[in-house]
Image (cartoon, rainbow, N blue to C red):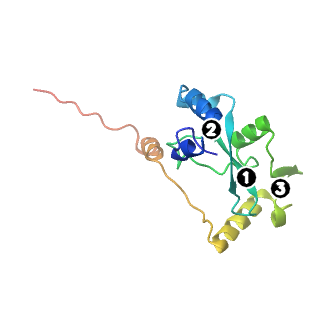
Amino acid sequence: MLAPEHPLVEKLANDEVRAYVEKAGTRSVEERQTKDKDGVFTGHYVVNPVNDERIPVWVADYVLMDYGTGAIMAVPAHDERDREFAETYGLAHTAGDRGGTEVLIDSGEFTGLPASEGIAKIVERLREKGRGAPAISYRLRDWSMSRQRYWGCPIPIVYCED
């Protein structure tokens, strides 16, 4: 899933994708995050690093360039926005509910595992294959907000001629 502003979009774009990108560009970030999710299929595929299956590349306006890299591996089973998008476009889900516990479905050897355990095992498999590793990304925006919660508002400075 790519943000409409992502540099790869122009390389993958056809007329339908270009029209969608133009339309998405007129929306504010807030509108892109809160409205019904929409997007357009680019006609291209990438390889899933876990199971080597082909997965479609979409451009979606809820994916933002200023959040991470502007490209995500949408996992509808574990993210509400991705799930909403997948349901809108009839895309596959890879989790189900078993007695109040979310479990992986259609996930090869990981099928049936509780989601938290399955995710950890998948990340470990990616590490073994040299295809990925867990990471935490911080944004300056996160730091500034947590700083204010911890220390309170910045001390105002008043310049006075007297």
For the residue marked with disc 3, what is the amino acid?
Answer: Val
Q: Earlier in the sequence, mark 1 or mark 2?
A: 2
Residue occupied by mark 2:
14
Mark 1 or mark 3, which is nearer to you?
1
Q: Residues within 10 Å of mark 2 (few under 14, many from 20)?
A: few
Residue at 31%, 37% (x, y): give it.
155
Q: In terms of sequence position, does the residue under pointer 3 or pointer 2 come before the other?
A: 2
Toward the bottom, the furthest residue is 128
State left or right for residue 103 relative to residue 72.
right
Q: Would residue 90 be seen by someone viewing this image from the given angle?
A: yes
Q: CA distance from mark 3 to mark 2?
A: 37 Å
Q: Quadrant of residue 157?
A: top left
Amino acid, disc 1: Ile
Foreground residue among 156 and 33: 33
What x and y, as percent, mark residue 91?
Answer: 79, 43
- Disc 3 target residue: 103
Q: Nearer the viewer, mark 3 or mark 2?
A: 2
Q: CA distance from mark 1 to mark 3?
A: 21 Å
Q: Residue furthest right?
A: 99
Q: Is residue 140 above or below residue 29?
A: below
Q: Position of residue 40 (x, y in %)?
A: 68, 36
How busy is the neighbourhood of tag 3: few (under 14 within 10 Å), some, or many (20 plus)? Answer: many
Q: Residues within 10 Å of mark 1 (few under 14, many from 20)?
A: few
Amino acid marked by disc 2? Asn
Which residue shows up at 60% across the image and 40% down it? 13
Mark 1 residue element? strand
Q: Is residue 126 left or right of residue 98?
A: left
What residue is shown with label 1? 55
Q: Earlier in the sequence, mark 1 or mark 3?
A: 1
For the residues marked 1 and 2, what is the alpha-carbon distance in whole angstroms?
A: 18 Å
